[in-house]
């Protein structure tokens, strides 16, 4: 029997409707504005910026893309961020990744004011994840939890396995799962027998950026599988490229109880969570002004 497909669109639309109401209410006191910074001309970053702008427009958030040249230094980028931090007309900031090799992207992200951190990657906001807070937290991690909860997945006491341990995906997802009282294992590049862990999982989250890393033989029958991966691979049928996840969908869908597709799954919800973070940032700044 094929798995239930956990489509991201209905979840994302529900979040966007809620965000639109919050943005409309906030506009009585502040103009919610997201400024995205893009350094250089990366095709992936530009595509993401376009989707950000479209999503912001849908919910009433003002959006500005600041395009900085490839020659911009790290010091110049940090100065640009400092100016945005001090600008009362800017309520949220995101540094679109990747940045050129001569810039330390993480160091630059740390310079974004925690109250304007739309991506939820400042150490202050990452620290909040340890306490289970989903306010200005990493968007993908919150999206995974939203998908699981919307699907009615029982997390308390469940065996959960997270494949990938990045600071904005794997680690915060694991912390959120533990907060929900799932018994959580984190696998990574040094894990000796990945399949031994994934076959135990009642809830399996995969996010490493490697197409087809997990196939149906590695999945526990009836498990809920959340595929966070986004990979562009050649399509042998068309000769063009296509987007796939980290899970081999064709084999996994025959074993899992529920699974997210790629595209059309977690990615759509992640964008909606970015919008929610912008709303959170605007509301936080309203409260700070009222003190």
Image (cartoon, grey):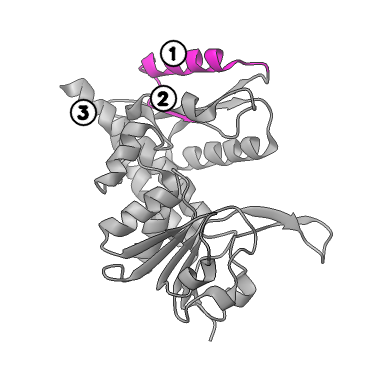
Give the quadrant of residue 31.
Answer: top left
At 59% across and 27% down in the image, what residue appears?
A: 38
**CA gap, disc 2 and disc 3:** 19 Å
Give the quadrant of residue 11.
Answer: bottom left
Classify residue 109 as left or right of residue 98.
left
Residues rendered magenta in the picture: 71-94
Looking at marks 1 and 3 on the same chain, the residue that comes earlier in the sequence is marked by: 1
In the picture, the disc for residue 83 is 1
In the picture, the disc for residue 219 is none
At 36% across and 44% down in the image, what residue appears?
A: 19
Q: Is residue 214 magenta?
A: no
The quadrant of the rendering that contains the C terminus is top left
Residue 224, placed above or below residue 41: below
At 39% across and 62% down in the image, what residue appears?
A: 185
Residue 148 point in image, percent of width and height: 38, 64
Secondary structure under tag 3 reads helix
Classify residue 132 as left or right of residue 226.
left
Q: Residue furthest right?
A: 239
**CA gap, disc 1 and disc 3:** 22 Å
Classify residue 8 as left or right of residue 146.
right
Where is mark 3, residue-wise? 287
Q: Is residue 78 magenta?
A: yes
Residue 232 point in image, percent of width and height: 69, 53
Residue 121 point in image, percent of width and height: 41, 36
Secondary structure under tag 1 reads helix
Where is mark 2, residue-wise? 112
Q: Residues within 10 Å of mark 3 (few under 14, many from 20)?
A: few
């Amino acid at each position: 029997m094929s798995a239930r497909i956990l489509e991201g669109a209905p979840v994302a639309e529900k979040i966007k409707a809620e965000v639109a109401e919050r943005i409309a209410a906030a506009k009585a006191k502040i103009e919610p504005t997201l400024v995205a910074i893009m350094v250089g001309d990366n095709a992936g970053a530009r595509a993401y910026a376009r989707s950000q702008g479209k999503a912001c427009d849908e919910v009433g958030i003002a959006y500005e893309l600041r395009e900085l040249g490839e020659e911009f230094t790290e010091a110049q980028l940090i100065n640009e961020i400092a100016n945005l931090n001090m600008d009362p007309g800017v309520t949220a900031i995101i540094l679109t990744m990747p940045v050129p090799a001569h810039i330390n992207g993480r160091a630059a992200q740390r310079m974004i004011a925690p109250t304007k951190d739309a991506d939820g990657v400042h150490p202050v906001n990452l620290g909040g994840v340890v306490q289970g807070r989903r306010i200005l937290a990493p968007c993908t991690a919150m999206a995974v939890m939203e998908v699981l909860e919307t699907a009615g997945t029982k997390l308390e006491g469940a065996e959960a396995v997270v494949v990938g341990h990045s600071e904005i995906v794997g680690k915060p997802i694991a912390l959120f799962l533990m907060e929900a009282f799932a018994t959580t294992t984190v696998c990574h590049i040094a894990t000796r027998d990945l399949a031994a862990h994934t076959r135990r999982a009642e809830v399996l989250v995969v996010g490493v950026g490697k197409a087809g890393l997990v196939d149906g033989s590695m999945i526990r029958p009836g498990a809920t599988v959340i595929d966070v991966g986004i990979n562009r691979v050649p399509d042998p049928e068309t000769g063009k490229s296509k987007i796939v996840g980290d899970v081999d969908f064709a084999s996994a869908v025959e074993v899992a109880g529920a699974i997210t597709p790629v595209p059309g799954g977690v990615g759509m919800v992640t964008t909606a969570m970015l919008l929610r973070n912008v709303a959170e940032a605007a509301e936080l700044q309203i409260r700070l002004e009222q003190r």
